[in-house]
Image (tube, rainbow, N blue to C red):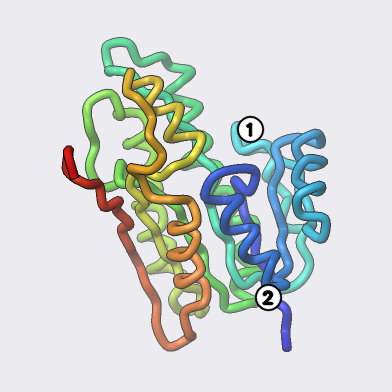
Amino acid sequence: MTVRRHVLTGAGSGIGAALARRLADRGDDLVLLARSEARAGELASTFPHAHLLVADLADPGTLNGLGRQVDGPVDSLVHVAGVVDLAPVERLRLAAWEEQVTVNLTAPAVLTRELLPHVRAGRGTVVFVNSSAGLTASAEWSAYAASKFGLRAFADSLRAEEVEHGVRVSTVYPSRTATPMQEKVHEQEGRTYDASRWISADTVADTLLHVIDLPADATIPDVTVRPVVPRPGT
C-alpha cells in the first residue's frame, strides 16, 4: 500500500494540529511548515516522523525555493495557518492590515506555486481552510475578511487552471471553532469565551479528511461548517 504524503501549515495548534494528529495516527507522511528552528523543534517532538520545513509565512520570500526541499508526489497541500487582528477601519493599523493579508493570502499563494509540481505529480488536492469571514464580512473584520475573500478568489482561479492537470482544489469555510485563535477573537471582542459553544477542531479535521480522502471521481469545491449553537436556556 502506497503511503500518502501531506504538506500542512498551522500544525502547531487548533485545526492544523488536529488534522496532523489524525494523519500521523493512520501512518501517512507529514511535511510540516514551521516559522523558525525553535518551532520546528517543538513540532518534531510532537510529530517525530514528520519532515520539517522552516519558513515564515509572515515573510513570503522565505518560501521561495521551498519546493526543492520536498521529494516526490504530494497527495494534499493543506493551508491552515492564519492570523486575525480585529479593528474598525478608522483605527486600522497598516501593520495589522499587511500582516493579515501577507499570512492569510500572499503566503498561501506563494507556497502553492512552490508545491504545485509535486501536487500535480500526485494528482493531489489543494485545500484552503478559509473562514465564514471569507463569505460575509462583519464590522471590525475588514482586514481579515479581505484576506479571506482574496483567498477564496485565489482558490477559484487555481481550480480552473489545474483541472486539466488532475489537481482538485477545495475551500473549507469553518465558522467559529474552539481554537486559540477563537479565544483571541473573543478577547478582542470583549466577550466571554466558552469553547463548548463552538465547533471542535476535530470536527473540522473530520471535514478536511473527507475532502482529502474523496475518491478520484469527484471533488468538493466548497464546504461550509457551522456550529449548532443552542438557544439561551436550552
Q: Residue furthest top?
A: 91
**Which disc, if any, is residue 98?**
none
**Which disc, if any, is residue 59?**
1
Judged from the image, the secondary structure of the residue bearing numbered disc 2 is: loop
Q: Where is residue 89, by image quadrant?
A: top left
Give the side of residue 49 with respect to residue 199, left or right. right
Residue 223 in the image, given as x and y percentages of width and height: 33, 63
What residue is shown with label 2?
4
Mark 1 and mark 2 in contact? Answer it, CB < 8 Å.
no
Residue 1 in the image, given as x and y percentages of width and height: 73, 88
- Relative to the observer, which residue lies in front, 63 or 77? 77
Q: Which image quarter holds the C terminus?
A: top left
Q: Residue at x 67, y 72 (%)?
A: 26
Q: Where is residue 204, by image quadrant?
A: bottom left
Q: Earlier in the sequence, mark 1 or mark 2?
A: 2
Q: Residue at x 63, y 32 (%)?
A: 59
Q: Give above or below for 215 relative to 116.
A: below
Residue 2 in the image, given as x and y percentages of width and height: 72, 84
Q: Judge whether residue 144 can be spotted in this image.
A: yes
Q: Give above or below for 177 relative to 181.
A: below
